Image (cartoon, rainbow, N blue to C red):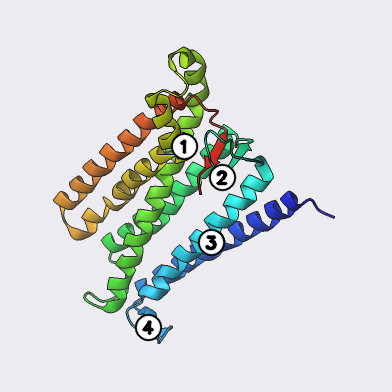
């Protein structure tokens, strides 16, 4: 009989991979459908506005995240219970991805962003979109671009921030471990902020979402839009990176994950 953790790893990764493929395929289908001048309601009659159908790839992406969460933790993690002092509900000691694999994920995320943002902008600039100006199909096309440009931009920035943290964390911790005082307000705050919640990745992700949307200024003919999103996104991404570079202050192993949920 397969070990329960093995089953979790197999099922989780399978669900994660299939859901991700469905999500990517659905976004490609929506862009092709609306870009060719057909509104979503022409295929899905009950979805007049198209928002429900446009949300479907997001739901699949969330399912993929859940699947990979359990699948990767089952494959690469050693689960344990919380300590009475920390009161976390569980901990996982992870065997981390290699730097090469992590960089490959970053490349895939960047390609996904280019597919949903850069390619549509190039097609628009060449007048290659068949959807008529002012049509619901064109409105839905750019809605898809906006939603998934933000999501893929956020994912790209989070993966990149995580990679920077991986490359610097252990060396910084070894070099400056004498500065950490266990139980001090600083160490406790960094443990909660970075080790438990990985909040620097969220901040970097917000920056990536803004940066991912900045090129829409070309479609809108608005330099103000482009520069505003680029400035905000850059500031947030830099903040996330600076926090990632200081995450060692938690004093905890970067390969360890703990949760209060």
Task: Please tell me which residue is depicted at 32% across the width and 79% down the height of the picture.
Answer: 49
In the image, what residue occupies the spot 52% across and 16% down?
Answer: 174
SS category of the residue bearing label 4: helix
Secondary element at tag 1: helix
Residue wearing tag 2: 89
Instruction: Give the residue number, with chain letter if any, for mark 3.
Output: 63
Q: Quick check: can you spot residue 132?
A: yes
Between 87 and 157, the residue placed more toward the observer is 87
Front residue of 60/88: it is 88
Which residue is denoted by mark 4 in the rendering? 41
Badge nearest the viewer, 2 or 4: 2
Residue at 62% over, 37% down? 94
For the residues labelled 1 and 3, say whether their Cβ atoms are less than 8 Å apart: no
The residue at which mark 1 appears reads as 162
Q: Earlier in the sequence, mark 2 or mark 4?
A: 4
Nearer the observer, 177 or 236: 177
Q: Nearer the viewer, mark 2 or mark 3?
A: 2
Regarding residue 33, the answer to whether it shows in the image is no
How many marks on residues? Answer: 4
Secondary structure at numbered mark 3: helix
Determine whether, in the image, residue 121 is placed left or right of residue 90: left
> What is the distance, in whole Å, between disc 2 and disc 1 at their CAs?
24 Å
Q: CA distance from mark 1 to mark 3?
A: 21 Å
Sequence-wise, the earlier of marks 1 and 4 is 4
Note whether 15 is above or below 254 in the view shown: below
Residue 65 drawn at (x, y percent):
53, 55
Earlier sequence position, callout 2 versus callout 3: 3
Labels 2 & 3 near each other (Cβ < 8 A):
no
| Distance from the alpha carbon under mark 2 to that under mark 4 | 46 Å
Residue at image point 29% right, 73% down: 138
Q: Residue 233, located in which quarter of the rendered image?
A: top left
């Amino acid at each position: 009989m397969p070990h329960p953790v093995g089953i979790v790893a197999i099922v989780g990764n399978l669900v994660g991979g299939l859901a991700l493929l469905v999500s990517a395929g659905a976004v490609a289908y929506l862009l092709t459908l609306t870009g060719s001048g057909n509104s979503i309601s022409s295929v899905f009659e009950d979805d007049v506005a198209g928002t429900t159908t446009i949300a479907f790839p997001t739901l699949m992406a969330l399912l993929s995240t859940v699947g990979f969460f359990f699948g990767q933790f089952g494959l690469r993690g050693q689960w344990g219970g919380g300590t009475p002092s920390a009161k976390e509900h569980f901990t996982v000691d992870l065997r981390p991805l290699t730097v090469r694999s992590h960089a490959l994920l970053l490349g895939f995320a960047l390609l996904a962003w280019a597919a949903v943002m850069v390619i549509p902008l190039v097609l628009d600039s060449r007048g290659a979109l068949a959807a008529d100006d002012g049509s619901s199909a064109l409105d839905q096309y750019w809605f898809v671009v906006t939603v998934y440009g933000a999501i893929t931009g956020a994912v790209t920035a989070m993966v990149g921030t995580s990679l920077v943290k991986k490359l610097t964390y252990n060396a910084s911790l070894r070099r400056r471990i004498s500065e950490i005082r266990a139980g001090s307000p600083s160490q406790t705050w960094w443990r909660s902020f970075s080790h438990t919640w990985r909040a620097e990745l969220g901040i970097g992700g917000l920056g990536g979402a803004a940066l991912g949307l900045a090129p829409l200024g070309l479609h809108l003919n608005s330099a103000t839009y482009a520069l505003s999103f680029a400035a905000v996104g850059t500031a947030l991404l830099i903040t996330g990176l600076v926090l990632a570079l200081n995450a060692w202050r938690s004093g905890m192993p970067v390969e360890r994950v703990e949760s209060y949920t």
